């Protein structure tokens, strides 16, 4: 027979699993859109002046998706079970940091 403590632990782990299944796809979609948006601006600031044609947002999303698939991403896990929340937050703000830094650099060109 399962005790109430074991039932509570199973229920809590089920809730965490469901939240992870919802949270992870939302974060992935956000990152693809954010990096694509930022990439389109950075492309216009730094690549178009070199004579390369400009790209639209959908091309930038596609390039962002391809680059995320072929580039190394640091692990967001402290160990096998726990997610390092500071790395997740850092990953969420990375495109906006890149956009700000790119804007400053474009002003200096």
Image (cartoon, grey):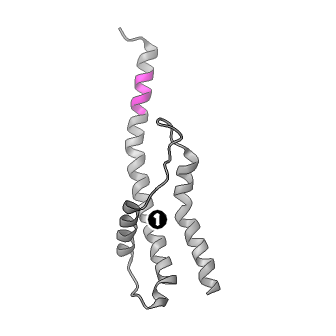
- In the image, residue 73 lies at what x, y percent? 46, 56
Residue at image position (35%, 73%) is 58
Locate residue 16, reporting x and y percent.
Answer: 43, 34
Task: Kindly identify the residue that appears in the image at 46 percent across and 73 percent down.
Answer: 39
Q: Residue at x 63, y 84 (%)?
A: 107
Element under label 1?
helix
In this view, 32 is above or below 58: above
Q: Which residues are magenta?
A: 9-15
Which quadrant: the C terminus?
bottom right
Give the overall secondary structure of the magenta segment: helix
Q: Horizontal placement of 108 versus 31: left or right?
A: right
Q: Magenta span has 12? A: yes
For residue 92, above or below residue 58: above
Residue 89 in percent (x, y) is at 55, 52
* 57 left or right, relative to 75: left
- In which quadrant will I find the N terminus? top left
- In the image, is residue 24 above or below residue 96? above
Total labels: the figure holds: 1
Asked whether residue 63 is drawn in magenta, I would say no
Residue shown at 63% from the left, 78% from the top: 104
Going by the picture, which residue comes out furthest to the top? Answer: 1
| Side (left or right) of 108 relative to 81 | right
For label 1, the residue is 34
- Residue 12, given in percent of the width and then of the height, sits at 44, 27
């Amino acid at each position: 027979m399962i005790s109430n403590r074991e039932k509570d632990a199973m229920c809590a782990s089920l809730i965490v699993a469901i939240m992870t299944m919802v949270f992870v796809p939302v974060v992935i979609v956000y990152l693809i859109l954010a990096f694509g948006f930022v990439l389109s601006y950075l492309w216009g600031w730094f690549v178009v002046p070199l004579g390369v044609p400009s790209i639209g947002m959908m091309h930038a999303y596609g390039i962002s998706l391809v680059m995320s698939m072929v580039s190394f991403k640091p692990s967001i896990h402290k160990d096998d079970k726990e997610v390092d929340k500071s790395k997740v937050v850092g990953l969420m703000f990375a495109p906006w940091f890149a956009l700000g830094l790119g804007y400053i650099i474009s002003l200096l060109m």
